[in-house]
Amino acid sequence: MGAPRAPLCLLAAADGLPFARTVGAELGHPVTPSHDTWFACGEAKHVIEANVRGNDVYVVQQTVVPGSGRSIYDRLMMALHAVDAARCADAARVTLILPYLPGSRQDKRKNWAREGVSTGLFARMFEAAGVDMVLTIEPHNEAVVGCYGRSVFEGISITRAFARFLDAEGLRRDCMASTDVGGLEMARAFAANLRCDLVALSKERDYSRPNTVARSTLLGDVQGRSVMIIDDIIDTAGSVVAAVETLWEHGATDVVVGAAHLILSGPAWDRLHRLRTSAEARGYDFRVVGVSHIQHPEAPAWYHEFQVEPLLAKIIRSVNTRGSVRAAEER
């Protein structure tokens, strides 16, 4: 690593502040004072309370906050307000850190000719606001980098660090599986790091109905074996239910479910609780593992949380000193 490109400034919108403070503690760098303001009509602004002129600014925002009264789009707009505030305050460079990238599942058209591609829309918004770099964790599709022109897009891989956590916590299983063929490469990477076998599930969706899985088919042998299912995003957990039930139908035993982005909207927790109850009735173990950028404060004892803040702190330090993101992921 070289010298810092400019003084480092860690900035956060209100919903990203708790996460940013933990990252800042890992960096040994406090979060710069600032605040969000929401007006009665629903408009908003972000105000920075310190001098950031000439700084290398990192704006942190959590776009998924379970239980919050605001939407992902509200939090996305506040992140843009924070970027704009930093630009208007003459920051030398602005990096936007969105651990979960909004619109990441809307990266292509699916059977409909007259729908937008939200990932591209948001990329254009980030660039128009003056973002120099976007940092996100495990983007749904690495091809989204093609949506960015002037801005640099970096998708952070948590595979190695997450796999070490699973091993240390005793959550390694006999087999690694994906919920569908699209997640097979991620499952393959985890299987390689954990030195376990790989199986796959082929998922058929009904795109006329959101969050609906028609059926799931197993590719591989799980008879009498424990399995970990890994995915990038788990939202309503419909795919998880189909996957776990298919695994049990084929003789699997203990199951661990993990995701980079454990959103758990709507019926998700009820579905997971039912899987836990079903596992106990079979005499099996069932556990869930999430990543700390999405908090589930009332999660049950069978929920485990991987702390991603140390990894993100290393990456911020690496970017600030013109180092390698990939090398920071491997350390």
Image (cartoon, rainbow, N blue to C red):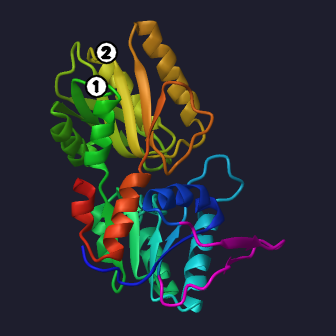
Q: Percent position (x, y) of residue 63?
A: 55, 60
Is 54 a magenta residue?
A: yes
Point 31% across, 31% down: residue: 168
Point 59% across, 72% down: residue: 32
- In this rendering, the answer to whether 73 lies above or below 193 is below
Q: Percent position (x, y) of residue 212?
A: 46, 41
Point 56% across, 59% down: residue: 21
- Which comes before the other along the chain, label 1 or label 2? 1
**Can you tell which quarter of the image residue 196 is in?**
top left
Q: Main secondary structure of the magenta part?
A: loop
Q: Secondary structure at mark 2?
A: loop
Q: Secondary structure at mark 1?
A: strand
Name which residue type carries label 2.
Answer: Thr
Span of residues in magenta: 30-55
Crowd rating for badge 1 (residues with CA inside 10 Å; few <14, some 14–19, many 20+): many
- In this rendering, the answer to whether 189 lies above or below 321 is above
Mark 2, residue position:
253
Is 136 a magenta residue?
A: no
Mark 1, residue position:
227
Q: Nearer the viewer, residue 88 or 249?
A: 88
**Distance from label 1 to label 2 (Cα)?**
7 Å
Crowd rating for badge 2 (residues with CA inside 10 Å; few <14, some 14–19, many 20+): many
Name which residue type carries label 1.
Answer: Val
Q: Quadrant of the N terminus?
A: bottom left
Instruction: Name the side, left or right, on which 120 lies relative to 141.
Output: right
- In this rendering, the answer to whether 197 lies above or below 330 is above
Determine if residue 119 is in view: yes
Q: Percent position (x, y) of residue 224?
A: 23, 12
Q: Quadrant of the C terminus?
A: bottom left
Q: Nearer the viewer, residue 251 or 70?
A: 70
Determine if residue 107 is in view: no
Q: Percent position (x, y) of residue 320?
A: 36, 75
